[in-house]
Amino acid sequence: MSGATALYSLLGIGILALVLYDVFTTVLHHWGGAGLISGRLAHGVWDVAVGLTRGMESRRRRYLLGKVGPLLVPGTVVLWAGLLIVGFALLYLPWLPGSFHGGRAIPEVGSVGDAIYYSGVTFFTVGYGDIVPVQTGLRLIAMLEGGSGFALITLVVSYFTSIYTAYS
C-alpha cells in the first residue's frame, strides 16, 4: 500500500467514523445532546441567523428565527450524506482506474470526480452500473455504502417523525 493510498484510506475512514458517531449521538442517543458535527452546525447557523436578524422588528425577527430550527434537520442530513459520500469516495480514489471498470460510455475512469460520482450513485442506491469495481473488497465497500445510505435515510425519517411535535 503506497503512502497516498494509506492517506486517502485513513482520511476516508476518519470521515466515516466521525459521521457515524455524529449520527449515533444525534439520532440514536439524542438525550445526550447533539453530536460534534450537528452541534457545531446548529450553533453556527443559529449565531449567523441571530446576527443577520439583529435590529429587525421583533415580530419579523421571531418569525425568521422560528424557521431556522426546522431547517437545521434537513441541512444536517445533507451535510451527513455529503460527508459520507466524500468519505467513501476517498476509499475508492486510490484504486481508480485499475480496480474499476468503466462501461462503453466511460472508457477511462480515474478522476476525483469519478470517485465522488460512483460514491454518490452507490450511496443513494441508484446503481447505474456505468462504473463497476472489479475487486471483491471494493465490492464489499460498495455494499456497505449502499446500506449506510439506506440506513441514514431511514434513521432520519424516524428521527424527524419523533421530533416533529416539538417543532410544531
Image: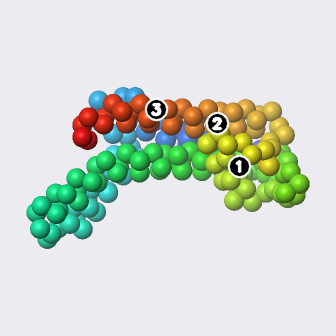
In the image as oriented, which residue stretches furthest toward the bottom?
Answer: 55
Which residue is rendered at x = 32% and y = 57% of the image? 45
Identify the mark nearer the N-term, 1 or 3. Answer: 1
Q: Which residue is mark 3?
A: 155
Position in image of residue 50 (x %, y %): 21, 61
Identify the mark nearer the N-term, 2 or 3. Answer: 2
Q: Above or below — where is 132 with respect to 52?
A: above
Identify the mark nearer the N-term, 2 or 1. Answer: 1
The C terminus - image quarter: top left
Is 109 or 167 nearer to us in this picture?
Answer: 167
Which residue is rendered at x = 83% and y = 45% of the image? 99
Which residue is rendered at x = 10% and y = 63% of the image? 58
Query: Is residue 41 found left or right of 52 in the rendered image?
Result: right
**Number of numbered discs on residues:** 3
Q: Are marks 2 and 1 in contact (CB under 8 Å)?
A: no
Query: Is residue 156 found left or right of 119 in the rendered image?
Result: left
Residue type at mark 1: give it: Tyr
Q: Which residue is mark 1?
A: 118
Q: Is residue 40 visible?
A: no
Q: Are marks 1 and 3 in contact (CB under 8 Å)?
A: no
SS for callout 1: helix
Position in image of residue 37 (x %, y %): 41, 46
Residue type at mark 3: give it: Leu
SS for callout 3: helix
Query: Is residue 124 found left or right of 136 in the rendered image?
Result: left
Q: Which residue is mark 2?
A: 146
Position in image of residue 49 (x %, y %): 26, 61
Q: Residues within 10 Å of mark 3 (few under 14, many from 20)?
A: some
Is 49 or 95 nearer to us in this picture?
Answer: 49
